[in-house]
Amino acid sequence: MLRTCSSTVRQIFFQSCIRQSSTGAETVNETNDSAQLFYDPNVEPIISSQQYLDEKNFFIPPRQVWLENLDSVQEKKLGLVTLHPEIFAAQPRIDIIHENVRWQRLYRFVSYAHTKVRSEVSGGGRKPWPQKGQGRARHGSIRSPLWRKGGCVHGPRAPTPHFYMIPFYTRILGLTSMLSVKLAQDDLHLVKNLEIPFDEPSYLEQLVQERQWGPSVLFIDSSDVMPQNIAIATNFIKHYNLMPVYGLNVYSMLKHNTLVLTESAARLIEEKILYHLNRIDSHAAITKYSIHPA
């Protein structure tokens, strides 16, 4: 990771903040006042860029995302972060997203619907009537499926698991498609870290409302040990959830309106997905899944 900052970069950054926070109808004084809401001139902006080995082969330029803060309700732009286009600007595949969601909803589902076969229903210990001589149809047991309250044929038997696995790279492309969709819809935000000054749930609710994020927010960090304040605050709000990078999945990103990544989490996601997209032993990852490997 390269962090560069100079007077020229600081000036360009300040001008871009002014353009974002002002409109053509505002005066110069109002523009400068509003710019202070987005940029602190006393703090050097963070220009975070990554040197990629395949930069010459990029079909589209890398994506640049604002680095925001969480230490105040009011939004502040701390800098710019460059993201890999193959992960955060990929062509979204709605069919692959749907396939991932369907897999995640079914692989842990177990059906407990159960019907009894003829050996499990009560009664039928003897032949109901003689085979011949009474003019009635021949029957050997009242537990036959032909009888009322008899056994059921080809009915559901519990427990019935619906576990299956989709191909490995279908899961990888599902992550890149979902991250790209979130960024394109302006529902993906980068923050420096997850440190907040208070552990009150009202602080997070006010912050989300002020920044016009969605009603449900998913916070992603590179570590599974979260800061204490945000862990306590989100514990009382069911639609604000914390998750480490290794637990990131398509269904959780789709279920939450807003995705908030720390800078370290975004870099770790890039590292992991780029490794799998370019690994030389990809044949080992695409082998058919077996519950009982040989």
Image (cartoon, rainbow, N blue to C red):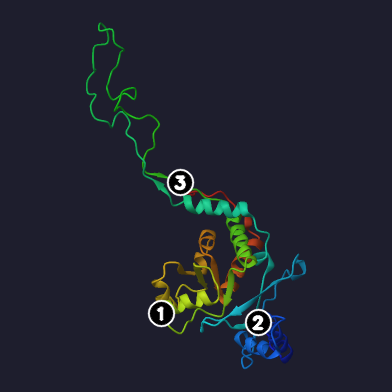
Q: Can you identify the residue that label 2 sits on?
A: 21
Numbered label attached to residue 200: 1
Numbered label attached to residue 41: none
Q: Residues within 10 Å of mark 3 (few under 14, many from 20)?
A: few
Disc 3 on helix, strand or loop?
loop
| Disc 3 + disc 1, Cβ < 8 Å | no
Q: In the displayed structure, would residue 106 be above or below residue 220?
A: above
Residue type at tag 1: Glu
Q: Residues within 10 Å of mark 2 (few under 14, many from 20)?
A: some
Q: CA distance from mark 3 to mark 2?
A: 51 Å
Numbered label attached to residue 162: 3
What residue lies at 40% left-to-right and 47% top-to-bottom? Answer: 110
Q: Earlier in the sequence, mark 3 or mark 1?
A: 3
- Percent across and percent down for residue 203 are 45, 79
Residue type at tag 2: Ser
Residue type at tag 3: His
What residue lies at 61% left-to-right and 51% top-to-bottom? Answer: 95
